[in-house]
């Protein structure tokens, strides 16, 4: 059975972007780029909500380099009730989120990954669809912005599997939902 992995970057105070959607606090080093390369190779399908898709489509199709090439070739599912069409090797999904994700998880193949989107992450958490969290914490305090765990009510427990430190000060924590 395939897993749904959440792999997201987050500030130390829990934001995935600044108040004006800034992402400039994300700085990379060679080992962190190797992690991103590895996870792209490890998964078969990227999942985005509408907002994340609209942000990604502005940058990635024109980007160059080995990471961009891999990113642009991967199949993507876009969950949206308002979009009418998508591009960028994507398929538009507007139906039963839980049913679609569970059907995909039960098919053979590589894992699925959610790289961005606080709204869709909240939905996935409420529907108990996430199998693994890979949170890359950047050493920055944003103070405001979009929280990673937007609209998630009540505590939910996570079990830490491993931690990896990077030279730029980032920390990857891998968790399983309890």
Image (cartoon, rainbow, N blue to C red):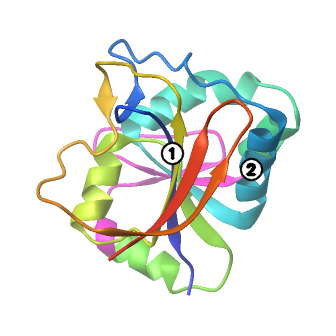
Q: Residue at x 40, y 79 (%)?
A: 102
The secondary element bearing badge 2 is classed as helix
Based on the picture, tell me whether residue 157 belongs to the magenta stretch: no
Which stretch appears magenta?
72-98
Counting from the top left corner in percent of width and height, residue 117 is at 40, 41
Which is nearer the eye, 127 or 138? 138
Which residue position is annotated with label 1? 8
Q: Is residue 87 visible?
A: yes
Res. 146 image quadrant: top left
Farthest residue in the right direction?
Answer: 66
Which quarter of the figure is the N terminus placed in?
bottom right
What is the CA distance from the residue labelled 2 to the residue labelled 1? 12 Å
Which residue position is annotated with label 2? 35
Q: Residue at x 71, y 41 (%)?
A: 166
Q: 115 left or right of 74?
A: left
Res. 98 image quadrant: bottom left
Q: Residue at x 52, y 64 (%)?
A: 5
């Amino acid at each position: 059975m395939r897993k749904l992995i959440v792999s997201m970057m987050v500030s130390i105070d829990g934001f995935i972007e600044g108040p004006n959607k800034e992402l400039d606090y994300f700085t990379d080093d060679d080992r962190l780029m190797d992690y991103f390369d590895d996870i792209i190779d490890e998964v078969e399908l990227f999942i985005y909500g509408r907002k994340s898709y609209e942000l990604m489509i502005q940058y990635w199709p024109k980007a160059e380099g080995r990471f961009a090439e891999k990113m642009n070739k991967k199949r993507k599912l876009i969950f949206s009730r308002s979009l009418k069409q998508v591009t960028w090797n994507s398929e538009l999904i507007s139906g039963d989120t839980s049913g679609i994700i569970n059907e995909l998880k039960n098919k053979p193949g590589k894992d699925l990954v959610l790289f961005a989107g606080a709204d869709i992450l909240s939905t996935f958490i409420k529907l108990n669809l996430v199998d693994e969290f890979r949170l890359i914490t950047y050493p920055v305090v944003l103070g405001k912005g979009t929280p990673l765990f937007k609209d998630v009510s009540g505590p939910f427990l996570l079990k830490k599997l491993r931690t990896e430190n990077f030279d730029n000060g980032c920390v990857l924590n891998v968790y399983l939902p309890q």
